[in-house]
Image: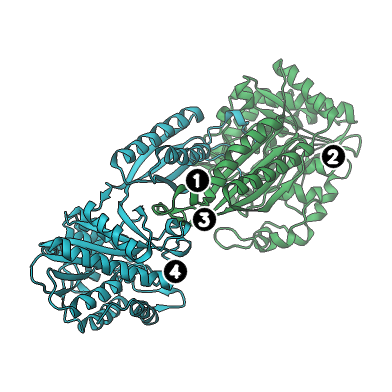
Chain colours: A cyan, B green
Amino acid sequence: MSLDPARTVAELDELRALTGDDNGAQRVAWTETWEHARAWLREKVAATGAREEIDEAGNQWFTLTGRSEGALLIGGHIDSVPNGGWLDGCLNVLAGVEVLRRIAAEGEPPLTVRLVNWADEEGARFGRSLFGSSAAAGSMRDQDEIRERRDANGVRWEDALREHGVDLDRVLDARARLEGARAYLELHIEQGPVLESMDLPLGVVLGTFGVERHRVTFRGQAAHAGSTPMDKRRDALAGAARLELEIREIAKRTGGGAVCTMGGVVTKPGIVTSVVETAECLLDQRHLDAQKLAGMLAAARDTADWIAREEALEVDWEKIWSIEPILFHDELVELADASVREVSGTSHRLPSGPLHDAAEVARAGVPTVMLFVQSLRGLSHTKLEDTRREHLELSVQALDRLAAKALERFA
Amino acid sequence: MSLDPARTVAELDELRALTGDDNGAQRVAWTETWEHARAWLREKVAATGAREEIDEAGNQWFTLTGRSEGALLIGGHIDSVPNGGWLDGCLNVLAGVEVLRRIAAEGEPPLTVRLVNWADEEGARFGRSLFGSSAAAGSMRDQDEIRERRDANGVRWEDALREHGVDLDRVLDARARLEGARAYLELHIEQGPVLESMDLPLGVVLGTFGVERHRVTFRGQAAHAGSTPMDKRRDALAGAARLELEIREIAKRTGGGAVCTMGGVVTKPGIVTSVVETAECLLDQRHLDAQKLAGMLAAARDTADWIAREEALEVDWEKIWSIEPILFHDELVELADASVREVSGTSHRLPSGPLHDAAEVARAGVPTVMLFVQSLRGLSHTKLEDTRREHLELSVQALDRLAAKALERFA
């Protein structure tokens, strides 16, 4: 039995029909539809003979025992955001199923091969992503906060977890599942426009960006829009506007794929008859290089300070969240590059802006790499998310080549 | 009996104690507290012998019959915003009462003198200002909309009017009250920082600014803050930011007291992980010169267009409201200037950014002028609103001088 990438595309269609509706995919973690998808996956994998286990964090593992206890891991997530796309997360899993089939058909592999369907990558229902992979990686530190989180209907996360067989006090026991892991592979849609703009089907991911996320608040003075001369204003929105334009220059100066985003501004009082008194800006900065990321943050702080001085404003910074850059494994990047070139002729290396389960696995010290397949118009987290079918098939082939090379190299 | 400006200040204190609380003035139109204030005013004026009438729009008139049916009008409004200041509106009325006393004490005046307490200048409860003066001026056109307006508790404006003896179908009959008016005078706190910054107690108002108010919406493309390179973004917030900074240049270039304000921006989706797809900006532009105001609007439109082109955005304009500049009467401005100089040594002429009842009266063709008295820190519509007591007394004197000059000139 040889690899059948067209079957993966057919199974993606099947899963879409089973767990989606007119608004898109509805496989939100810790819901019935998600359990339905997991049961469906169980049936799909059964024929390979891989053994299924659900770990303490709700991750679904399929294990094909090999000649060694050392393991090659292939991962993905079948959960989606509400009204999500047909590929984000489940392409990874179903491509992994196809690779598992090919390996199983060839007899006992040199390493144990494990496919993992991570629980709740998206964090869509409770607002905290990478649940299952961060538990398995041992990096989860916020159990107390998780315990108290509630969904939009007021249901406590801890209670929802219990309904799906997960005891929050034991989730870190899932760490045992990464013991013996020699390599971790993950395929994902790019969720960005880079490969499409280069007209390339596939790319190799160098790592995931470090992120610095802050709320920057400028404070001036509310004043009547009619009676306050221009030179007597302390307009907080002017501070926000100048910072919004300056962060683009900071990203450009830094280079190397740097991105800076002001994702929103809240203006108060926010009425047409008043100069803005406070402007709260959401700032997101990302880079693959930790030093450059630190430099971008320092530059944004300096910039906000001189803007505040020039505009006679006060400025406050409040950290929302940050994570360091996570670099993937050099040798695996080379193997991935060779795999992509074999199936599509040309490869391209790029960082990942979004986080992925792979980042958690890499943080835990497991050699890791990811493949990206082109996203049309860079869209994801919407039913408009799409990738050409021929590119999906190429991506299954590339993951298979990479798995074969990794089995050979890490055995 | 001579003019007693200290009495006006004492009566302002008395009214504050009667109709305010720890949060400020509470004389919101069409409430019991407002009726209470009107009844209190009736008692204050009674001793002058002036005849009280409430017109079809709820305006409270006090008439001192003179040798001619031609009338000198002095106006103000006793209504306030909730948690308002102790001066906005009622200073005008109480200074007028003091002037009425002085004129009454001197015997039959050459013109009929009428003090008017306009109904609902602020529009605080139902969100539409200048109710009584626009009815009397005949410029009210929105009765159908007024009928359906409701307050925060769902009470229809029409019903609230009826409770206070006002029939919405008859409010334009109040127009008869302006027949025979030869001049209209109004004193008001500046509500801005200009006189304080010049260390002047009093100023003469040249007219009220024309206003152009628009919602300007930039539309780009939501995109992942991590996976979308800087050069592939269509960031609607960049459009808003550039327009916010450019309108300051437009105001500066235009000069002559021009003001441009972006009072608020609403960003969508407005989350830290996404480039902004739409940015809705509230734009307010004001000038005393109609042509310059039109020029500022055209410049803002051109600017938004080239910003949209450069940023690959779409831009839409939606008119919220506009009003033409209203210029006060040249001769009355000269008389006001002379009056201010007589009581304080120096005068200054300035436009009014906020609208006032005087603008409605001027629109109706009655020769009109206003006096401003300094506002501390330019604050109003807050309990922090204040003016030095010696300046309040000077303002009563200036209004009295102006009334005397107008009686002489327009008799």
Up-down: is B312 above or below B349?
Answer: below
Residue B260 seen in this snapshot: yes
* Amino acid on which disc 3 is placed: Glu
Pointer 3 indicates a residue of which chain? Answer: B
Pointer 2 indicates a residue of which chain? Answer: B
Q: Which residue bears the numbered disc 4?
A: A386
Residue B358 occupies which quadrant of the picture?
A: top right
Q: Which residue bears the numbered disc 1?
A: A267
Q: Are marks 1 and 2 on the same chain?
A: no
* Amino acid on which disc 4 is placed: Asp
**Alpha-carbon distance for marks 4 and 3?**
20 Å
* Amino acid on which disc 1 is placed: Thr
* Amino acid on which disc 2 is placed: Val
**Alpha-carbon distance for marks 2 and 3?**
49 Å
In the rendered structure, which disc, 2 or 3, sits on the residue that comes first in sequence? 3
Residue under the point 69% across and 29% down? B372
Whether tag 1 and tag 3 are in contact, CB under 8 A, the answer is no
- Residue B21: x percent and y percent? 50, 42
Q: Nearer the viewer, mark 2 or mark 3?
A: 3
Up-down: is A156 above or below A138?
Answer: below
Residue under the point 20% across and 63% down? A406
In the rendered structure, which disc, 4 or 1, sits on the residue that comes first in sequence? 1
Residue B366 disc label? 2
Q: Nearer the viewer, mark 2 or mark 4?
A: 4
